[in-house]
Image: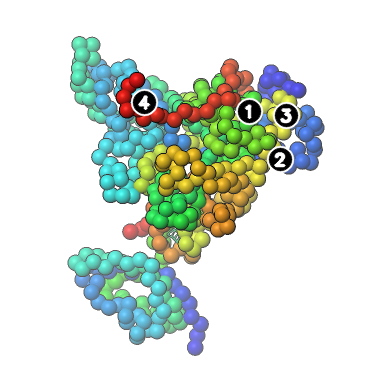
Amino acid sequence: MSQTVTKKLMLFFPRCECEKPIIYHLVKDHNLVVNVYRAKVTPEEEGYLVLDVTGTEEDIERAMAFVKTFNVSINYTGKGVTVDMDRCTHCGHCITYCPTEALYIADEATREVAFSERDCIECLACIRVCPFGACASAF
Amino acid sequence: MKTYEQINDRIESGKAVVLTAEEIIDYVEKKGLAAAAKEVDVVTTATFGPMCSSGCVLNFGHSKPKIRMSEAWVEDVLVYTGLAAVDVYLGATQLRHGDPANMYHPGEFRYGGGHVIEDLVAGKTLQLFALSYGTDCYPLREIRTYFTIDDLNQAIMVNPRNCYQNYNVAVNDSDKTIYTYMGPLEPDRKNANYCSAGQLSPLLNDPYYETIGVGTRVWLAGTHGHVYAEGTQHAGGGERTPDGVPKDGAGTLALTGDMKQMRPEFVRGVTLRGYGVSLALGIGIPIPLLNEEILKRTCVRDRDILAPVIDYSTNYPQNTGKVISYVNYEQLRSGRIELEGREVAVGSLSSYHKALEIAHLLADEIRRGDFRLAEPIAPLPKDTTTKPLVIREKAS
Ligand code: SF4
Ligand code: SF4
């Protein structure tokens, strides 16, 4: 069996596709391990899912082909949460609230704060606590 | 021993030796106090953080016909008009008109006075709306117009209290999250927040106010301002360590400077969820090394500075004065402190990173000869304490 990989995805649902059990099929038919960070699935409205999928490259490819048949658009960049470093003052206020150390002190000497997108689980805590409006969410 | 004049002469000739309050520590350790006192002329200190008692006086100039503003709003943020016709005072913590505040707790407080000040300095176009009752000399009763800071005759920052010498560390001893001006505090002391530049902070490097006084020239958000008075709640007479470092808020400074010359990255609106809005400012203050004693005090390190840990669920609001314990800034900066046997995660509201940047910017300006030191015209009091507000049943 080939190696498994993890990909971060954003799926945008048009109004009519929200009721379909897409996640169920990703797990059942395509052997993917799914970790959902954020979801908005309100009937009669557009929705989105931000998730990690883990599986073989082939399984993920097949699964995405399946997802596309529902008229769902897929965004691989996974930038659900962004930190605007021009607005960040490096105060470090967000750090104790971030559960994964995605926001961290990158340099002890200068106390510079950095953001590791890879480690962000989109809990949105930093957006609520940053006093300087540096953190934002795509949704 | 050096005088202000001698130091200023060296600055003028581009020969002044300037180090930051961080650099001086190692320098003195290497060279010794006496040699360092001879060689180094100035130590630069700095801080960047929320300073609620800040604001500015704006003069709009006169419209045709003229108006005597009796109520006015800039970007829907109320400004104080109890001054002359077109002078207003804009305060950092003023909420925007219609902000639901904490009606839906915790309130978001996305925009307010501090943000208007940030936008002004950033050169944005802002809306002025003003009303008047009309007089014979000022007949206009309503005005709505758009302006930038360049259209104003004056935009002068006048901050009654900046640069707290030291500050509390806030924790929450209750069983629910509380939202304070020190940020959200999770139940059962799950986190702690502090707000000071520690060893870089201006008044911690001059604990007895020997060089910082009324009239001292300061670096205020990129321009040159000065100390115009002791800050409100200035209380130099509190408890100190044997080295003279205050163990509580202690001294404060009232600062002023021309906003037209400020740099936007050092004037930043602040949002504190569940609490309100404020303004964060970058301030740098040079300390002339007049003698060895003054130099010695600038060598203060994070580990020598103690901050009181205070419960913000009961003891702070009820003004009990109870201190859980004291921790030093080295411990705070490590991100963890121990309180009564338990580890607590620590965050900050003040940016050491920006403070360091400011200390270097100011040092460069002095080295280039662009920043001269000003000798204070009056000292800050060393022996005062703050008085409480007594709630009296009736006038006696
Ligand atoms: S709280 Fe905001 S400004 Fe402060 S370090 Fe975090 S992202 Fe930067
Ligand atoms: S969204 Fe959550 S996990 Fe991501 S950086 Fe912000 S606090 Fe950390």
Question: How far separated are the C-alphas under marks 1 and 4?
Answer: 32 Å
Question: How far separated are the C-alphas under marks 4 and 2?
Answer: 41 Å
**Circles 4 and 2 on the same subunit:** yes
Which residue is painted at 80% across and 32% down in the image? B35
User: Which residue in the structure is indicated by mark 1?
Assistant: B208
Q: Position of residue B214 (x, y in %)?
A: 55, 21
Q: Earlier in the sequence, mark 1 or mark 3?
A: 1
Front position in the image: B40 or B98: B98
Question: How far separated are the C-alphas under marks 1 and 2?
Answer: 19 Å
- Residue B196's quadrant in the figure? top right
Question: How far separated are the C-alphas under marks 1 and 3?
Answer: 11 Å
- Residue B295's quadrant in the figure? top right
Give amino acid for label 3. Answer: Glu
**Circles 1 and 2 on the same subunit:** yes
Q: Is mark 2 within 8 Å of ligand 1?
A: no
Is residue B56 toward the left or the right of residue B282 in the image?
left
Which residue is painted at 61% across and 46% down in the image? B328
Q: Chain of mark 1?
A: B
